[in-house]
């Protein structure tokens, strides 16, 4: 009877438009089903819940708390087990139906509107495969379709390939695939969103253009097309493939079907065909897993992959099968935490990052462990939005979340594709820091490491290119080897009138040139020339500043209310603080700590920098803490007021750790001979006293620099040492000033001639 009914329905629905070809049972399967939360289920009770036929939403069901979708009969069976249920939503079907409603923002163009809704896999205009083909039609020189295999039910598993084949060379690859688990609909949107963003910005965004020209990217929006189709036609919450198992159960979890550590521990997969995490009868039993595996085996250039899942907002890496850290855990952490920051910066959402086993739960036979262990691929998995599921199921995600989800995920994929691990045949790494500014007249020693990655470094080719004028050619300096992989060189001294730029390069045995930074990034290293830190007090010894009231130099004791004082300085033991033993007093007048005069003559674009640990009742002007600057000790410019600048809803401004502070004081301090900095405690009211100020590591930093005509080498002197530069710069009135020579153009007539040399001789000491 059921089979006959289904045949009648199929005939009837075949007359509907393509977009409406969804069988009625898909719109009614979960009618009268509820989302419920169950606490404290034992292992035996878990098995009994599974036996009721209820849908357990937890990806790895285990004793304890569970989220379940169940009808009334199933709920009664659960309650008969002595378990307490908490209903999160009364009508699961209503949520499913709402998810399928067309967006009211649709404008009629299926391409422009594609990311307003979810879409079926391959059913004509508006489907996922249609959109992939549409991208190929619009960008035929950069995008193409690749058949990577066939599903168990005969569907083609399509990949979108992004590459500019007009640019020759050995190109590293990346593989980003999604919808391994059929019910994770939002993941199907991410590869195509990434592709559209990349293709639309090619030619205008230099990073994206360089990436497409020099990499090969494969994007698989639906890795489990049979299961995904079933979520549209029959069961929205279906997870596995549609393989008919030997015992009559259906489906294999293809993220437990890979060959690495397959079946290692039943806590990370299951040998039961009825389980949501059934690993299959043998590794790679599923054609879908084989297709993804062979994609990597057949493209040895693939350096990174991401297996995209939902939900819980996670960034995961190996190992899954054991709690041990993988050998390259520092590398995974470096890039995982970088992507975490990138995602947070878009919409302020936090993704938790860490190895699979310790971050989410044990998993064996997963794609990450296999790709990393067998091929050395930098393999990640993402769990996309939401952090927690509305009504207990984040698999049913409002289509309004599609675009913001991908707005934050796409930059993370761009970052990963452009990492040196992926892009550089030979890795060049800095072993010495690039300073914030270059000191005029001072050489800069530099050290780097050069190591082979997926091509072999050619010895003797490590070099640095530099110039001091952006319109001039780069000079080449070969690096000197100082160890097995270490190299060094020195950037020559220069002056305040120059604009330094430099980068490193090395060749491989296959003809590739690797650079640091790579060309797609922000260009060469380009620190400005300036004095930098010209005044620094680390307060290890007492500088003898003027104190009032309970201001004192010494070791803080950790006393005081709320978060309390620190017990040492930011560096070293000592600080300047207000009442090193505890809180400031109530009804305290403004009480100051003032530096001795600081000479800022010849310093420009001056910043005040220091570290603070502050506790003050700042809201509503109750208590105040201030910072001010003066160039005469009488007239003060206020830089900070805890009471006036307070913007938090919290009544108190209390640091829990040492906090970096910086203020632009150039308007008061630039080129001034006597500059004072003052920290004020108070005035305070009659209640709620806190620990007040603790101050350490005070620096005045000049970011600007004024050149002296004739001082070619930047040593602040015009002398015979600068005269040699005239040999290259003395071009006369016929030619414009050569790059880097403008500091010798005394009369600013755009050429260096004998008149300038005569003025140089007068200025030379």
Image: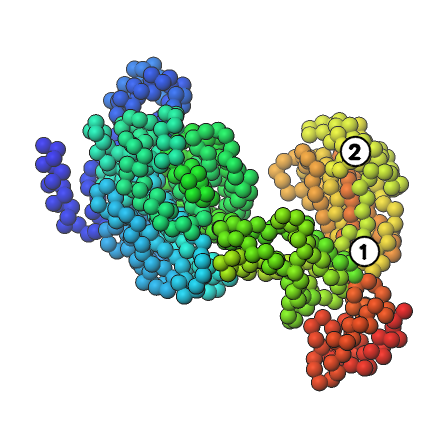
Total numbered labels: 2
Residue 682 screen position, x and y as percent: 79, 38
Q: Using the rendered image of the protein, determine whether residue 158 is visible from the camera's viewpoint.
A: yes
Is residue 516 toward the left or the right of residue 413 in the image?
A: right
x and y percent of residue 306 in the render? 42, 44
10 Å crowding of disc 1: few (<14), some (14-19), many (20+): many
Picture layout, residue 129 above or below residue 716: above
Locate the N terminus and report the quarter of the image it occupies. Answer: top left
* Residue highlighted by disc 2: 573
Q: Is residue 142 left or right of residue 740?
A: left
- Residue at image coords 81%, 78%: 756
Name the residue located 50 percent from the left edge and 30 percent from the top edge: 324
Residue 544 or residue 502, whichever sits in front: 502
Secondary structure beneath dot 1 equals helix
Viewer-nearest residue: 608 or 51: 51
User: Residue 761 appears in which quarter of the rendering?
Assistant: bottom right
What is the crowding at mark 2: few (fewer than 14 residues within 10 Å), some, or many (at least 20)? some
Rendered image: mark on residue 372: none
Helix, strand or loop under label 2: loop
> Which residue is labeled 1 in the image?
669
Q: Earlier in the sequence, mark 2 or mark 1?
A: 2
Check the image and name the residue furthest to the bottom. 734
Give me the residue at 77% from left, 76% from top: 727
At 44% from the left and 38% from the top, the residue drawn is 373
Cα distance in 3D space between marks 2 and 1: 30 Å
Q: Position of residue 50 (x, y in %)?
A: 29, 23
């Amino acid at each position: 009877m059921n089979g006959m009914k289904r045949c009648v329905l199929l005939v009837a629905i075949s007359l509907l438009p393509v977009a409406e070809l969804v069988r009625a049972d898909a719109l009614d399967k979960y009618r009268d089903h509820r989302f419920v939360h169950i606490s404290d289920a034992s292992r035996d009770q878990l098995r009994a819940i599974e036996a009721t036929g209820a849908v357990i939403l937890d990806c790895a069901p285990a004793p304890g708390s569970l989220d379940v979708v169940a009808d009334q009969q199933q709920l009664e069976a659960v309650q008969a087990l002595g378990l307490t249920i908490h209903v999160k939503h009364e009508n699961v079907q209503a949520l499913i139906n709402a998810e399928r409603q067309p967006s009211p923002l649709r404008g009629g163009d299926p391409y422009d509107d594609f990311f307003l809704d979810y879409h079926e896999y391959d059913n004509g205009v508006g489907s996922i495969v249609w959109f992939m083909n549409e991208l190929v039609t619009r960008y035929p020189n950069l995008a193409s379709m690749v058949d990577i295999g066939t599903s168990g039910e005969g569907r083609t598993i399509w990949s979108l390939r992004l590459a500019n084949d007009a640019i020759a060379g050995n190109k590293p690859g990346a593989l980003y695939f999604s919808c391994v688990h059929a019910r994770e609909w939002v993941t199907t949107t991410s590869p195509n969103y990434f592709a559209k963003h990349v293709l639309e910005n090619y030619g205008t965004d230099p990073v994206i253009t360089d990436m497409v020209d020099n990499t090969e990217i494969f994007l698989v929006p639906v890795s489990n097309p049979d299961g995904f189709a079933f979520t549209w036609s029959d069961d929205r919450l279906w997870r596995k493939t549609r393989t008919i198992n030997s015992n009559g159960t259906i489906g294999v979890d293809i993220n437990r079907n890979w060959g690495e550590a397959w079946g290692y521990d039943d806590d990370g997969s299951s040998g039961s065909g009825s389980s949501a995490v059934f690993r299959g009868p043998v590794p790679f039993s599923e054609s879908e897993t084989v297709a993804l595996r062979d994609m990597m085996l057949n493209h040895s250039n693939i350096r990174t992959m991401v297996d995209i899942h939902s939900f819980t907002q996670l960034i995961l890496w190996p190992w899954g099968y054991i709690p041990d850290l993988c050998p390259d855990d520092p590398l995974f952490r470096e890039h995982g935490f970088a992507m975490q920051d990138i995602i947070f910066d878009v919409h302020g959402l936090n993704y938790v990052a860490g190895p699979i086993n310790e971050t989410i739960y044990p998993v064996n036979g997963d794609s990450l462990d296999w790709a990393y262990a067998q091929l050395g691929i930098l393999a990640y998995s993402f769990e996309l939005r939401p952090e927690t599921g509305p009504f207990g199921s984040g698999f049913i995600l409002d289509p309004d979340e599609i675009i913001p989800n991908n707005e934050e995920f796409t930059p993370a994929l761009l970052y990963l594709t452009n990492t040196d691990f992926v892009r550089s045949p030979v890795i060049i790494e800095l072993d010495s820091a690039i300073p914030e500014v270059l000191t005029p007249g001072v050489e800069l020693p530099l050290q780097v490491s050069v190591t082979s990655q997926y091509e072999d470094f050619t010895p003797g080719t490590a070099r640095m290119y530099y110039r001091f004028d952006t319109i001039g050619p780069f000079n080449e300096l070969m690096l000197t080897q100082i160890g097995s992989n270490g190299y060094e060189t020195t950037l020559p001294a220069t002056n305040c009138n120059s604009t330094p730029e430099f980068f490193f390069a090395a060749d491989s045995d296959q003809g590739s040139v690797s650079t640091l930074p790579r060309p797609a990034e922000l260009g060469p290293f380009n620190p400005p020339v300036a004095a930098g830190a010209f005044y620094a007090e680390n307060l290890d010894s007492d500088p003898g500043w003027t104190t009032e009231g309970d201001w004192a130099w010494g070791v803080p004791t950790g006393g005081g209310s709320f978060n309390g004082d620190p017990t040492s300085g930011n560096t070293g033991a000592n600080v300047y603080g207000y009442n090193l033993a505890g809180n400031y007093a109530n009804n305290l007048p403004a009480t100051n700590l003032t530096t001795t005069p600081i000479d800022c003559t010849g310093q420009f674009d001056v910043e005040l920098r220091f570290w603070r640990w502050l506790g003050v009742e700042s809201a509503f002007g109750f208590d105040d803490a201030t910072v001010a600057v003066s160039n005469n000790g009488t007239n003060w410019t206020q830089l900070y007021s805890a009471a006036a600048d307070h913007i938090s809803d919290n009544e108190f401004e209390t640091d829990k750790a040492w906090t970096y502070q910086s203020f632009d004081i150039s308007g008061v301090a630039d080129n001034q001979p006597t500059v004072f900095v003052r920290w004020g405690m108070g005035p305070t009211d009659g209640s709620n006293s806190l620990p007040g100020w603790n101050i350490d590591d005070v620096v005045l930093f000049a970011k600007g620099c004024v050149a002296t005509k004739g001082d070619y080498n930047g040593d602040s002197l015009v002398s015979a040492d600068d005269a040699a530069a005239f040999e290259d710069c003395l071009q006369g009135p016929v030619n414009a000033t050569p790059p880097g020579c403008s500091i010798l153009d005394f009369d600013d007539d755009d050429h260096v001639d004998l008149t300038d040399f005569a003025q140089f001789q007068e200025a030379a000491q």
